Image: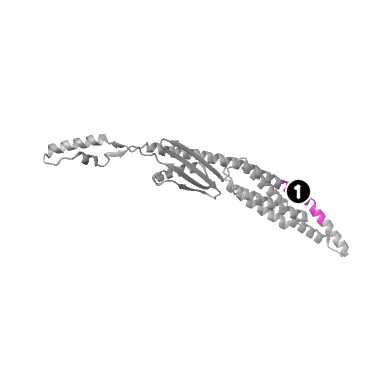
Amino acid sequence: MIYSMTAFARAEQSFDRGSVQWELRSVNQRYLEAQFRVPESLRDLEPQLRERLRNRLKRGKVDATLKYELPQSTGQLALNRPLLLQLLAAIEQIKRDAPEASHMSPLDLLRWPGMLSEERDDLETARAIVLSTFDDALDALLAHRAREGAELAELIDGKFAALLDIVEEVRQLTQGLAAEQQAKMQARIGELQVNVDPGRLEQEVALLAQRADVAEELDRLLVHVQEGRHLLSKPGPHGRQLDFLMQELNREANTLGSKSVLAQTAQRAIDLKVTIEQIREQVQNIE
């Protein structure tokens, strides 16, 4: 399956006195690059988020934005009773060992670190929701990329079919070209009424035929197009391979244009280059 690198997705989830919303945007990029915008209180989750992203995507620049509302405080103070009991037991032990030691007041006990805390929803549960919602957004992003990828694959395959038509047309135009050039040269010699060594004439005709022979270029164009269509039918990513094929196709089209001796083949070489460039522009969007 072919995936596009351009997509957008959003996923959100609410819970008691809080909510999570992820927005993911991806665009073209030679490699995978991710930028996360998350609150500082959740910055430690970024390595996990990046790992999840790398496991699903291979290329593209991804912007991930988290909109997060922390669970609201209930405003009630909670007493750390286990800590209080430990502290009281320690005080009783001190009284036995050092009766002259001063006593702690209830206010002193309340000031002890960790003795009082505000009741708050389970933050670990909230962090788990942040991760699961990110997975949902990532699923939606991949679905979007898959839909666009299918459309790109269909469009590119149609362009490949157009290339095959042009290659076949040029092949038909160039068949018998050597014999035609030989006949033209002999007719020209006859018009000039000069004597030419038959061996030399044969060499000149062979040289012209060699310069104008584009069979190899047409064969290579055919092979590259077939390889491109094969890649479109296989699981990806294939963006880099297709981009390389575009370079090879363009090189063969340039050679075909330089060797063209007919106006029709020269025009068809230009049509080839235009179609290849159209494919290349679309290939830039493929993962």
Q: Does residue 235 appear in this view?
A: no
Query: Type of residue at label 1?
Result: Glu
Q: Residue at x 70, y 44 (%)?
A: 161
For residue 262, what is the image quadrant?
Answer: bottom right
Q: Is residue 173 left or right of residue 276?
A: right
Image location of residue 27, percent across then percent down:
55, 48
Q: Is residue 177 left or right of residue 34?
A: right
**In the image, is residue 198 part of the stretch drawn in magenta?**
no
Q: Is residue 257 left or right of residue 23?
A: right
**In the image, is residue 174 part of the stretch drawn in magenta?**
yes
Image location of residue 287, percent across then percent down:
56, 45
Q: Residue at x 19, y 37 (%)?
A: 90
Q: Does residue 91 appear in this view?
A: yes
Residue sitting at the far front: 75
Mark 1 element type:
helix
Q: Nearer the viewer, residue 243 or 44?
A: 44
Q: Nearer the viewer, residue 9 or 226?
A: 9
Q: Which residues lie in the magenta part? A: 163-181
Q: Is residue 81 left or right of residue 175?
A: left
Image location of residue 33, percent across then percent down:
50, 49
The N terminus is located in which quarter?
Answer: top right
What secondary structure prevails in the magenta region?
helix
Q: Residue at x 65, y 52 (%)?
A: 277
Q: Residue at x 61, y 48 (%)?
A: 283
Image location of residue 148, percent across then percent down:
60, 42
Which residue, given by chain and number where applicable, does mark 1 sit on? 169
